[in-house]
Amino acid sequence: MTRTVALNPTSPPPPPEALGRRLDTLRGARVGFFSNNKPNADALLERTARALQDRFGIEPRFFTKEVPSLEAGEALLATCSEACDAIVLAAYD
């Protein structure tokens, strides 16, 4: 007899403190665009940044982690956190 195992690939929602505070407005905000370094992620982020810059006057800042399959290092995450009011993440292929 064959045994079937069903897995749930979803994770529980993050705790509220992990989400940070919601900005009152994007107007003039320093918005980071964080690429996971996979193909097309940069193109998606650049288009999104341009659209938000045209519409809200954001100050875009771009970050890319070195290896797509590994998590971003603490130093890079700290730099992003200090330099930005909000972050947009792309995980794209």
Image: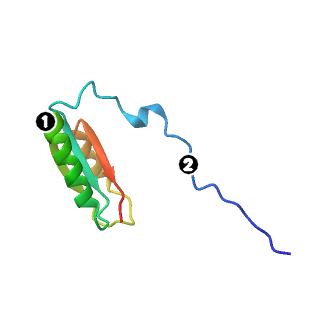
Q: CA distance from mark 2 to mark 1?
A: 34 Å
- Amino acid type assigned to the residue bearing label 1 in the image: Gly
Task: Specify the quadrant of the image occupied by residue 53.
Answer: top left
Indicate the quadrant containing the C terminus: top left, top right, bottom left or bottom right: bottom left
Please tell me which residue is depicted at 32% across the width and 56% down the height of the picture: 73
Q: Is residue 32 above or below residue 70?
A: above
Relative to 30, residue 71 above or below: below
Q: Nearer the viewer, residue 46 or 19?
A: 46
Q: Nearer the viewer, mark 2 or mark 1?
A: 1
> How far from the left and from the top, in percent, is residue 72?
33, 57
In this rendering, position of residue 57 left or right of residue 8? left
Q: Position of residue 16 (x, y in %)?
A: 46, 32
At label 2, which amino acid type do we have? Ser
Residue at 38% across / 64% down in the picture? 70
Q: Is residue 30 left or right of residue 19?
A: left
Quarter-wise, where is residue 9 in the image? bottom right
Where in the figure is residue 85, as x and y percent of width and height? 24, 35
Q: Which residue is mark 1?
A: 57
Q: Residue furthest right?
A: 1
What's the residue at 30%, 68% (across, down)? Answer: 39
Residue position marked by numbered label 2 in the rendering: 11
State the colouring used for the structure image: rainbow
Q: Residue furthest top?
A: 24
Q: Closest to the observer: 55 or 83?
A: 55
* Cβ atoms at labels 2 and 1 below 8 Å apart: no
Q: Residues within 10 Å of mark 2 (few under 14, many from 20)?
A: few
Q: Secondary structure at mark 1?
A: loop
Question: Which of the 4 quarters of the picture holds residue 63?
Answer: bottom left
